[in-house]
Amino acid sequence: MIGSLIHSFLWFSGPFVLTILILILGHTWRISFRGWEQVLKYDNSVLYTFWHENMLPVLFSHKKRGVGIIVSLSPDGELVARILKILGYKVFRGDTEKRGRKVMKELIQYGKGNKEIAITPDGPSGPRREVKRGVFVIARRTELPLFAVKIEAGRCFRFSSWDRFMLPLPFSKIKISIRGPIEKLDSEVLKEALSN
């Protein structure tokens, strides 16, 4: 009985606690942007792409903007989805195995309403830094300009997950370089823009 109460408490309070920790940590980062002026030309109606491993700084920097994003239906995805909702994202649940086509249609419809949307082209489960074609399907159907977002952190910890998830340490300098719009919807072109 007590064990189930503790589990329930952690399940419901966990996302709030983690969100607070992300906000505290994020406010210590020294974030600089490069290329933001290109996004402003499109009134922020764009499609952002970034590697799955680099999502944390971007999720902090773009909070409370209503950016649409797909999150997997896994248990980890549930935790991430709840955190993102608290941070002000529009979350769509699904992945390639479950609700894949439907969730893509939902995100595309949202993007067609002149909204910002974001996708990790190697997510949700890799392979690491391999571009999947879904990002190009979404770009074509929404007709949103595609921007590659490269994130670099001066000091960070990397987890031993499939993507080697990056956690920038407190007071790290973080460079967010926004490149685009990417005219040629090609895997190698996008991969180069995200990595180099």
Image (cartoon, helix red, strand yellow):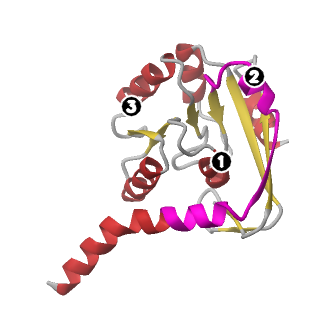
Identify the amino acid type marked 3: Val
Q: CA distance from mark 2 to mark 1?
A: 22 Å
Disc 2: CA contacts within 10 A as few (<14), some (14-19) or many (>=20): some
In the image: residue 193, left or right of residue 48:
right
Q: Looking at the picture, does residue 87 appear above or below residue 134?
A: below
Tag count: 3
Residue range in magenta is 19-46
In the image: residue 7, left or right of residue 91:
left
- Estimate the x, y position of residue 71 in percent, counting from the top left: 44, 44
Identify the amino acid type marked 1: Ser
Residue at the spot 55% in from the left edge and 37% down from the top edge = 65
Q: CA distance from mark 2 to mark 3?
A: 24 Å
Q: Nearer the viewer, mark 2 or mark 1?
A: 1
Residue located beneath label 3 in the image: 103
On residue 182, the disc is 2
Q: Looking at the picture, does residue 24 appear above or below residue 176?
A: below
Question: Secondary structure beneath disc 3?
Answer: helix
Residue located beneath label 1 in the image: 61
Question: Secondary structure beneath disc 2?
Answer: loop
Identify the amino acid type marked 2: Ile
In the depicted view, which residue is nearer to us: 101 or 20? 20
